Image (tube, rainbow, N blue to C red):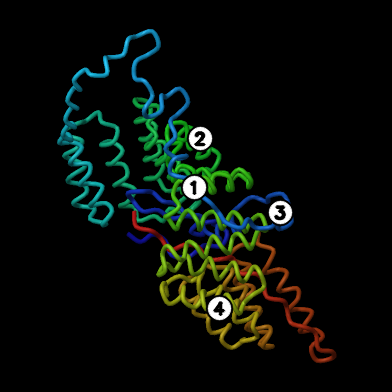
Amino acid sequence: MQGGTASRTGACGAGAFASRARSGAFSIGLAWITACAPQAPAAAPPEPAPAAIVPPSAAELTAPEPGVAPAGAPAAPVGVDAPPADAPAKPAPSPAAPSRAAVELSAADAALDQDQLDVAAQHFDRALALAPQDPAARLGVLRLRFARLGVALSYAEAPQNPELQRLVREADALLRDHADYGPALLEQGHWLIVLGDAPRALAVLERALRSEAQNAEVHSALGTAYLATGETERALDQFERAVQLGPNEPERWSSWGTALMLRGRLSEATRSFEHALELRPDDARAESDLGTAHLANHRPDLALPHLSRATQLAPERATFLTNLGYAYELQGQLEKAVETQRRAVALDPKLGSAWINLGNALASLRQYEQAEIALRQAAALDPSDPRPQASLKDLEEVRAHDSAAPVSPPAPAPARPPSPPPRKH
């Protein structure tokens, strides 16, 4: 199912991360970082990138927990005689057949993956009737209700949504009966992030981590919550761990790359985005993230192919268009920049960055009246955003002195980088 479209100035609903219904695979977006993250301490100077990012080996990931006997260790405790070496081996027990409720849940998950919501509902209902106290069945019904909302899994995407608030309360009720049920804690954390309640999401996801330490998605969601509360370094640790646990999942690399960019580690971030794109070559989000990284590194020539490709793959994404227009502007292709920004604001009239970039591109062409209209539109959308006011001040100075002494037009305002396309729920 498709969620919201582009980011909204002032709402911080900038497609921060996305999810597929089965896995809940969040990946934070660059737009959310720029638009919504609290003011973090100044980024450390760029650090030398490691020669390679090496996830833990399979042996490390499957190492036994402390206190658990490793494979091949004596099964009998100390002080108990082990059976003689020549004792006949007992036949291994046959694996238990899955219960009817488990079969229904598996079918429901498969249908949810394919956006077959009515089919999923039938299977969830049957599972719940067969096992009314099964937390997986109860949670499945809640997950289906969230999928029917069609809300993008983005930070503060729906801060006052009453159905989301009900889902959080019903997850509370489920957790009163099953306090340590990790999947319910994870989903509740997701919904709290969508509501914009980062502090509570953080507390819930930290609880989830106790029982789901090997779940890459728990680490990703927790990293997003840390970013939302300004704890950048802790967020980076969580995203790195998610990459180690899910090295073949492009969302993990994209999220880690975003956090690396926030710390000024552009070379590592670029490599992380490149790896995400290798894993999913036709992903508009991965193309856009890589292009944005090149923009941040002052390389619009490298950014343009990726940003252009992103708009081809997802022409409905206004945020992708505004960054493409910004790249055109940096290269001096002002007519193309204006045309691209006009397409962006036509797709999403509430996208403040597109109005700012349109105004600055028009100012560069000395179309001052139209530039002022665009910049005032941006200012009206979000009075707390200082960028429109700064550009309006520059524009006023340029217009006042243009006839007497040429003054450089306003410098382009950095576009808020694009958000990921909504994932299927």
Q: Amino acid at mark 1?
A: Gln
Label 2 crowding class (10 Å Cα cut-off): few <14, some 14-19, many 20+?
many
Return the disc, 4 or 3, that comes first in the chain's sequence.
3
User: Total of numbered circles in the picture?
Assistant: 4
- Residue at the disc numbered 2: 206
- Residue at the disc numbered 1: 244
Occupied quadrant, residue 136:
top left
Cα separation, mark 4 vs mark 3, equals: 26 Å
Return the disc, 4 or 2, that comes first in the chain's sequence.
2
Q: Nearer the viewer, residue 356 or 424?
A: 424
Of labels 3 and 1, the one closer to you:
1
Residue at the front extreme, as displayed: 86
Cα separation, mark 1 vs mark 2, equals: 19 Å
Tag 4 secondary structure: helix
Q: Nearer the viewer, residue 405 or 311?
A: 311
Cα separation, mark 3 vs mark 1, equals: 24 Å
Tag 1 secondary structure: helix
- Residue at the disc numbered 4: 304
Return the disc, 3 or 2, that comes first in the chain's sequence.
3
Return the disc, 3 or 1, that comes first in the chain's sequence.
3
Task: Please provide percent x and percent y for residue 24.
Answer: 39, 49
